[in-house]
Amino acid sequence: MASQKDPEVRLPNGPKSRALLFGAGRFNDERLPDLPAVENNLADLAEVLTSSWGAGLSSQHCVVLPDPAGVAVLGTHLEAVARQAEDVLLVYYAGHGLLDHRGELYLSLPQTKHDLLAWTGLPFGLLRNVLASSAARNRVLIIDSCFSGRAIEAMSDPVSVVTGQVEIDGTYTLTSSPANSVSNAPEGARHTAFTGEMLKLLRNGDPQEPELLSLGAIYRNLRLALHHRGLNPPQHRGTATADLLALAQNRAYVPPTPAPAPLPEPAEPTRKPTEFSLKTESKWWWKRNRAKTLAAVTSLIVVASMIVVGSWWAGRCAPGVARIGDECVGVTDGFRAPGTTGTSLSWS
């Protein structure tokens, strides 16, 4: 069976993705302090998501809704983006998070009254149902919310909740603090602490991270940055490979240094004809072919020697045999061979 390819970090498919960024920074209830940084959070995050190096969303597909006029208005926009999204549905909220007497989470709106949450706040269960019913391939929920007073530069009191009821099947959730803990909104700062650090990472990048800034990388960097500031750590939950979805390109990405190419084999020295005379040509030829030449000469000497010796040996007569002209004639007991004379007899 062929093995499946490991999933890779990817950006959203812009035309098939939708985002809704909403929040509340101004409140009618005196017990809910205003959060001026929320409006900046929404505008600047939308700018990043729709930038050429961001998530690839168009401005038409990234709805920004600061201080919505009520649950019905918010619901109309939320239902629309959830229905339209095919690849990624991203929902971001910044504001006060409150619990009712049963421990259910509500997201505050400008009209929210602390003692009438069920009628004036956004029940998280309603938001959860809309996300769960979306046909989007990935759903991303980012919540930067708590409730508190400006005196301690916080957005929540101990009865607020950020992560208590946000685990949705098929959705990656990223929140600004643990359940029952405060998140920080520095007085006079342009952004809340959590969203400010996230924007800093998305805008500037991190040379230690890969080419795309995934949700997993964003969480790691936020946790470290908030820890260095002495603030509560963010929380995250996800299913399958949702943390591999990226929200921006890494603008500080440093490509790996390629391995050096292997050195080529040393080339045989080449000759320039103009640099060689007949004498240098002979020397060069002799240097290259000396061994072969010596072997050939030696072979020729051996063969010539064998020819000379063979010829000399072939001209001799055996003992007791006389050479008469070109013939060897046997002689025994003083008699000469027939047809010979004593004057022509010679011994070899």
Image (spheres, helix red, strand yellow):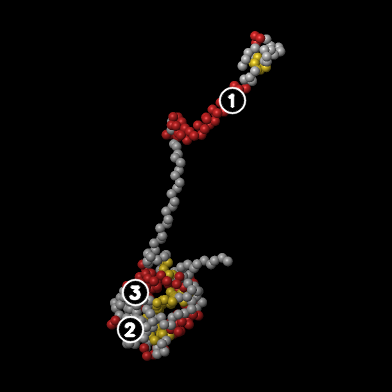
Q: Which mark is on residue 226?
A: 3
Which numbered disc, 3 or 1, marks the residue that appears first in the sequence? Answer: 3
Determine contact: label 3, label 1, CB under 8 Å. Answer: no
Determine contact: label 2, label 1, CB under 8 Å. Answer: no
Q: Quadrant of residue 72?
A: bottom left
Residue at far top of view: 343
What's the distance in space between the residues labelled 3 and 2, CA to CA?
Answer: 19 Å
Q: Split into 4 quadrants, where in the image is the N terminus?
A: bottom right
Residue at 45 percent across and 70 percent down: it is 244
Residue at 65 percent across and 12 percent down: it is 345
What's the distance in space between the residues labelled 3 and 1, CA to CA?
Answer: 102 Å
Give the amino acid type for the residue marked by disc 1 in the picture.
Answer: Ile
Which numbered disc, 2 or 1, marks the residue that appears first in the sequence? Answer: 2
Residue at 66 percent across and 9 percent down: it is 342
Q: Residues within 10 Å of mark 3 (few under 14, many from 20)?
A: some
Q: Is residue 94 visible?
A: no
Which numbered disc, 3 or 2, marks the residue that appears first in the sequence? Answer: 2
Q: What residue is pinned by disc 2?
A: 148
Q: Residues within 10 Å of mark 2 (few under 14, many from 20)?
A: many
Task: State how many labels appear.
Answer: 3
Image coordinates of residue 303 in percent, x first then y, are 57, 28
Kindly report which numbered mark, 2 or 1, lies closer to the viewer in this rendering: 1
Q: Residues within 10 Å of mark 1 (few under 14, many from 20)?
A: few
Q: Is residue 338 visible?
A: yes
Image coordinates of residue 74 in percent, x first then y, are 43, 82
What's the distance in space between the residues labelled 2 and 1, CA to CA?
Answer: 120 Å
Give the amino acid type for the residue marked by disc 2 in the picture.
Answer: Ser
Q: What residue is pinned by disc 1?
A: 307
Image coordinates of residue 182 in percent, x first then y, are 34, 81
Q: Quadrant of residue 331?
A: top right
Give the amino acid type for the residue marked by disc 3 in the picture.
Answer: Leu
Q: Nearer the viewer, residue 239 or 64?
A: 239
